[in-house]
Image (cartoon, helix red, strand yellow):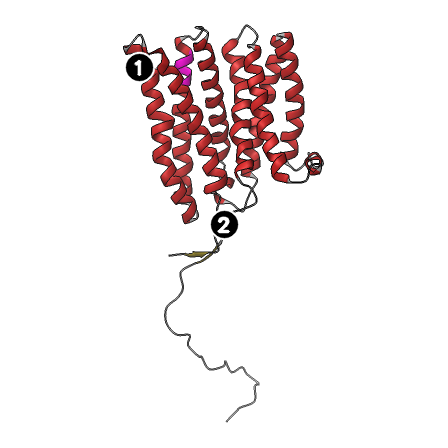
Amino acid sequence: MTISFGSKLQTNWDWRAACNFMFGGSGSGLLVMMAILAAPRPAPIVLAFVALALVGFGLLMVWFEIGRPWRFLHVFFHPQTSWMTREGSVGIVLFVATLVGGLMQSVTMTSLAAVLGFVFLYCQARILKAAAGIPAWREPVIVPLIIASGLVEGTAIVVMFFQAINAATPWMFGLLVLLFSARLWIWCVYRNVLIRRKAPAGTLQAFAKLHREFFMVGFLLPLLFVLTPLVLELAIWATYFAGVFVLVSGWRLKYVLVVKASFKQGYGIGKLRRGRPGVKPPVRREGDPIQF
């Protein structure tokens, strides 16, 4: 049995930092999926601006959290070691490529924006993994979890948009189901790893509560709403509910991950020996004087 203590919830990152992962992840995932689902045509300009608005809002929340207006420039000073620096640097090029691709309706620039969106999403995942002192963040499984969540959220936005303009196809819905099913599987693997490695009790409690919500809102309800139009032809509205649930469940996951489950490592004492320490007579070596 191991006695653990000193595990406290981190307070350096609050809901504003969570917004960067929530909305920035959705926006970068949207850049990837709108290029894939709109191919071989250029992605609609509306989706490009929505993606930029989401990424920009996430970065704006980080800027508000810093407190000092010009302190954000420090994030660009360490590209060789900091994933935050890499995220910010990629974000600048991402904005330019997305704007050019959207305004010029260029497939090449849209594809470049999609690649940059995936790199941006990967940098976000690596930012969390680099926090070695927080067990919920440092697990390697968190990288595919964050990436999968961003891609699912982006797919949900694209599917809802194409459904609104009557351009959605069955394979889009199939892809959406496949992605949010994969996200649930990665989440289960991630949670089981934390349980096996005895993560802080606060982390496990937060995730135990989230698991029920995530399974219901992030998988079961979207699956039912995607399948509903196959039975009821007039229930096209169900598609929007599926997309909203997928989107909100991803945001809820990342909010809990960053704000509610981010307990520090703490300290642990292993199994203690029982009994009294025995006092042994000193060892007499040859040549030592004889004491009476």
- The kind of residue on which mark 2 rests is Gln
On the image, the x and y values in percent for residue 58 come to 57, 29
Q: Is residue 40 magenta?
A: no
Judged from the image, the secondary structure of the residue bearing numbered disc 1 is helix
Q: Residues within 10 Å of mark 1 (few under 14, many from 20)?
A: some
Q: Nearer the viewer, residue 192 or 7?
A: 7
Give me the residue at 41% from left, 33% from top: 187
User: Range of the magenta residues?
Assistant: 172-176
- The kind of residue on which mark 1 rests is Thr
Give me the residue at 71% from left, 35% from top: 73
- Determine which residue is flagged by label 2: 265
Q: Is residue 165 above or below residue 204?
A: above
Judged from the image, the secondary structure of the residue bearing numbered disc 2 is loop
Is residue 198 something one can see in this rendering?
Answer: no
Is residue 184 something one can see in this rendering?
Answer: yes
On the image, the x and y values in percent for residue 47 come to 54, 14
Q: Nearer the viewer, mark 2 or mark 1?
A: 1
Quadrant containing the N terminus in the rendered view: bottom left
Give me the residue at 38% from left, 24% from top: 181
Q: Nearer the viewer, residue 284 or 268?
A: 268
The tally of labels here is 2
On the image, the x and y values in percent for residue 192 come to 38, 39
Which quadrant of the figure has residue 221? Answer: top left
Q: CA distance from mark 2 to mark 1?
A: 45 Å
On the image, the x and y values in percent for residue 138 come to 51, 41
Which quadrant of the figure has residue 118? Answer: top right
- Determine which residue is flagged by label 1: 228
Q: Residues within 10 Å of mark 2 (few under 14, many from 20)?
A: some
Query: In the visual, does 189 lie left or right of 292?
Result: left
Q: Is the Cβ of the residue at disc 2 closer than 8 Å to that at disc 1? A: no
Q: Is residue 261 above or below residue 33?
A: below
